[in-house]
Image (spheres, rainbow, N blue to C red):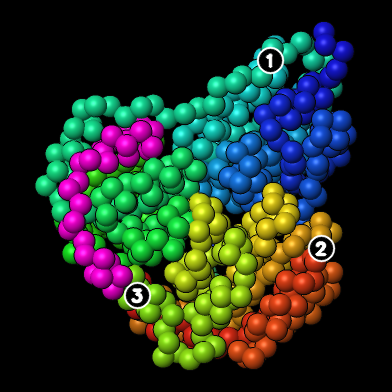
C-alpha cells in the first residue's frame, strides 16, 4: 500500500494532469475528503452558488488551460442540479470530470436522496466509473483520457466513502500521451484535392476545432495560400484575427452570410462541428469539403470529400490545392462591410445594441476576452466584437444555454486574472445565474458584466412574431440589476443613454473587482436587426 488513501491519490493525480482548481457545491460526504486533500496538491476549491454554474466554470477552465475541468457535486439534488452543465460539457465539447457522491455499499436500506445517478448522466457522458477495480488512479486516468479524446466531453466518477477512504495501492506514473487526432488519409486528401482543384472561389467556414492554437495557425496559413474569405462559427471566433481582411464575419446559419456563400464555388468546413449549425437544412448547392478531427454521430450535410484527422496536417497537405486569385480583395471587403452594417443597424440609432457593442469594443483593451449568453443580444455582440485570438469569445453553441456568460466570465478571469473579461448577457440569462455575482465578488474577479436589459426574452419574441403569433408571455418586469450587483458586493452602475455608457465602462474597468453595467435598452431593439441577420 502507498500510505495514503484513495481520495488523496486521486487529487494528486488530478494535479499531475495539470488541474489547478475545481468547482462545485459540496455535500457532507466524499466532497469533504476531496476538499481536504486539495491544498496539499496545489488545488483550489471554488465554491459556487449552483452546480450548473460550477460545470460551466469547469468546462471553460478546461478550454483555457488545456487541463481537464473538474466539477464536484453532492449526491441526489447536487448531481441533478448539475445536469444542464453536464449537457453543456457534452454538446460544447468540453473535457470535464464530474465527481459526485454515490451511496455507501452498506447503505442498502437508504432511500433518501437516492436515484440511479449514472443512468441519469449516461446519455451525456463519454465514460463512467465508480472505483470498483483494483487501481483507482488508473481508472481516473482512463476517464480523463476518454473525456479528452476528440470530441471532448464529460466523464463521470462516482465516489463512495468506503472506497475513497481505503488505502491506495501504489500508482504508476501518469500517462504522458494525450489523445491526438490521427494523420489524414492520403485517399481522402486526394478526393479533397479533386474538388478544390477546380475551385477558384472557395470559402472557408472555420468551426470550433479551429480554436486550438495549432489549428488556428493552420487556418490562417490556408486562408493566405488560397487567398479566400473566411467565416467563423461563434465557437471559432478569433481563430482568424478580425483585423485580417479575409475574415468576413460569423457564420450564423442565416441570411447574413448568404450573399458570400452564394458567390462561392466550393465551401470548406474547417473543424466545424454539426453541433454548431442551426436546425434548418444546409442551403447551399456548392460542393463541400469537410475537414474534421473526427467523424460525427449525425450527418448534417453530405460532403463531396471528407478528410478526417489532424487539422494542421490536413491544411498543409491541401495548401496547394487551390489556385488563388478568384477573390478580388475589394469584393471580400464589400461582403465584410455589408455583414457589419447588418449587425450595426445604424438606422436604429446610437443606443442600439449594435452601437453599444461597437462603442465598448472601441474602449476595451485589445486583448479583452468576452463571454456571451444565449439570446438576441448574442447576434450583435458576436458580429461586432473584434476577437483577435482563438477563444477570445466564449459562448455555448452546442447546448446554447442561457445562464452561461457570467460563470464563463468568472472562469476566464480566474484563468487569466490580468486580462479584461466582459460578460455580455440578456436580463433573462442573468436571472438564471445572478447569484454567481457573489462568487465573482468573493474571488475579486476583474470582470465587467454588461446586461443588455430589455426586460424581455427578445429572441423568443422575435420567433413568436415570425410565426405570426401574438406577442405575449415574453416580458419580465424591469429589474434594477445595478442594485442587485451592489447587493452581491460588486460595483453596479445604471446606463440609460450613450452619454452614460463609456464613463460607466471606464469606472467599471478601474473598479479592480467585478462590476456590472445595467444597460436599459428598448425591448423593440432587436426585432429588425435579428430578422435581417438570421432571415
Ligand atoms: C436554459 C435555457 N432556457 C431557455 C432557452 C431558450 N432561449 C434562448 S434565448 C432565450 C431568451 C433569452 O432572453 P434574454 O436573456 O433576456 O436575452 P435577449 O434575447 O432578450 O437578448 C430563451 C428563452 C435557452 N437557450 N436556455
Residue 435 location, quadrant: bottom right
Q: Which mark is residue 441?
A: 2
Q: Is residue 14 left or right of residue 395?
A: right
Residue 365 or 441: which is nearer the viewer? 365
Q: Determine the residue positioned at 81% across, 56% down.
A: 443
Label 3, ligand 1: CB separation under 8 Å:
no
Q: Which mark is residue 394?
A: none
Secondary structure under tag 2 reads helix
Q: Which residues are magenta?
A: 306-334
Q: Read off the residue under disc 1.
A: 173
Q: Residue furthest top?
A: 1
Residue 219 at x, y percent in the picture: 37, 47
Q: Read off the residue under disc 3.
A: 337
Secondary structure under tag 3 reads helix
Q: Determine the residue positioned at 84% across, 19% down.
A: 5
Residue 328 lies in magenta, yes or no? Answer: yes
Q: Mark 1 and mark 3: span between their CA atoms?
A: 54 Å
In front: label 1 or label 3: 3
Residue 142 lies in magenta, yes or no? Answer: no
Residue 283 at x, y percent in the picture: 23, 60
Task: Point out the tag, 3 or 2, that comes first from the N-terminus.
Answer: 3
Task: Point out the tag, 2 or 1, that comes first from the N-terminus.
Answer: 1
The quarter of the rendered structure image containing the C terminus is bottom left
Residue 348 or 400: which is nearer the viewer? 348
Q: Is residue 71 left or right of residue 316?
A: right
Residue 174 location, quadrant: top right
Amino acid at each position: 500500500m502507498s500510505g495514503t488513501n484513495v481520495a488523496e491519490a486521486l487529487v494528486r493525480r488530478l494535479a499531475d494532469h495539470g488541474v489547478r482548481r475545481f468547482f462545485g457545491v459540496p455535500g457532507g460526504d466524499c466532497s469533504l475528503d476531496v476538499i481536504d486533500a486539495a491544498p496539499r496538491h496545489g488545488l483550489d476549491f471554488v465554491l459556487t452558488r449552483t452546480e450548473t454554474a460550477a460545470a460551466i466554470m469547469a468546462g471553460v477552465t478546461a478550454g483555457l488551460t488545456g487541463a481537464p475541468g473538474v466539477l464536484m457535486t453532492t449526491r441526489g439534488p447536487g448531481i441533478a442540479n448539475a445536469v444542464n452543465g453536464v449537457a453543456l460539457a457534452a454538446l460544447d465539447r468540453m473535457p470535464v470530470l464530474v465527481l459526485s457522491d454515490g451511496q455507501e455499499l452498506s447503505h442498502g436500506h437508504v432511500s433518501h436522496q437516492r436515484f440511479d445517478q449514472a443512468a441519469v448522466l449516461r446519455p451525456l457522458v463519454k465514460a463512467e466509473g465508480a472505483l470498483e477495480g483494483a487501481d483507482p488512479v488508473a481508472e481516473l486516468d482512463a476517464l480523463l483520457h476518454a473525456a479528452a479524446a476528440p470530441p471532448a466531453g464529460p466523464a463521470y466518477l462516482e465516489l463512495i466513502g468506503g472506497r475513497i477512504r481505503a488505502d491506495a495501492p501504489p500508482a504508476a506514473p501518469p500517462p504522458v500521451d494525450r489523445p491526438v487526432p490521427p494523420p489524414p488519409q492520403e485517399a481522402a486528401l486526394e478526393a479533397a484535392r479533386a474538388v478544390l482543384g477546380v475551385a477558384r472561389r472557395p470559402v472557408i467556414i472555420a468551426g470550433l476545432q479551429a480554436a486550438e492554437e495549432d489549428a488556428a495557425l493552420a487556418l490562417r496559413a490556408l486562408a493566405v495560400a488560397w487567398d479566400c474569405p473566411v467565416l467563423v462559427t461563434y465557437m471559432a471566433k478569433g481563430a482568424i484575427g478580425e483585423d485580417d481582411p479575409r475574415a468576413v464575419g460569423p457564420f450564423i446559419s442565416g441570411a447574413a452570410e448568404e450573399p458570400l456563400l452564394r458567390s462561392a464555388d466550393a465551401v470548406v468546413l474547417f473543424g466545424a462541428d454539426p453541433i454548431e449549425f442551426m436546425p434548418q437544412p444546409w442551403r447551399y448547392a456548392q460542393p463541400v469539403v469537410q475537414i474534421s478531427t473526427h467523424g460525427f454521430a449525425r450527418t448534417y450535410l453530405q460532403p463531396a470529400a471528407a478528410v478526417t484527422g489532424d487539422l494542421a496536417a490536413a491544411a498543409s497537405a491541401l495548401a496547394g490545392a487551390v489556385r488563388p486569385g478568384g477573390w478580388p480583395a475589394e469584393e471580400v471587403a464589400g461582403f465584410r462591410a455589408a455583414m457589419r452594417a447588418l449587425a450595426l443597424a445604424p438606422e436604429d440609432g446610437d443606443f442600439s445594441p449594435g452601437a453599444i457593442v461597437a462603442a465598448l469594443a472601441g474602449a476595451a483593451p485589445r486583448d479583452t476576452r468576452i463571454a456571451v449568453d444565449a439570446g438576441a443580444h448574442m447576434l450583435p455582440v458576436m458580429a461586432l466584437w473584434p476577437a483577435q485570438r482563438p477563444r477570445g469569445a466564449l459562448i455555448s453553441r452546442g447546448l446554447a444555454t442561457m445562464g452561461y456568460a457570467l460563470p464563463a466570465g468568472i472562469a476566464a478571469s480566474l484563468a487569466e486574472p490580468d486580462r479584461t473579461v466582459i460578460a455580455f448577457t440578456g436580463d433573462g440569462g442573468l436571472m438564471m445565474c445572478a447569484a454567481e455575482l457573489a462568487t465573482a465578488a468573493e474571488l475579486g474577479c476583474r470582470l465587467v458584466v454588461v446586461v443588455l436589459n430589455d426586460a424581455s426574452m427578445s429572441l423568443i419574441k422575435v420567433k413568436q412574431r415570425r410565426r405570426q403569433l401574438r406577442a405575449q408571455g415574453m416580458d419580465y418586469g424591469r429589474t434594477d440589476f445595478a442594485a442587485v450587483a451592489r447587493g452581491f458586493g460588486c460595483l453596479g452602475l445604471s446606463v440609460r443613454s450613450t452619454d452614460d455608457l463609456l464613463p460607466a465602462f471606464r469606472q467599471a474597468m478601474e473598479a479592480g473587482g467585478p462590476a456590472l453595467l445595467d444597460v436599459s435598452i428598448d425591448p423593440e431593439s432587436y426585432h429588425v436587426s435579428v430578422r435581417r441577420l438570421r432571415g
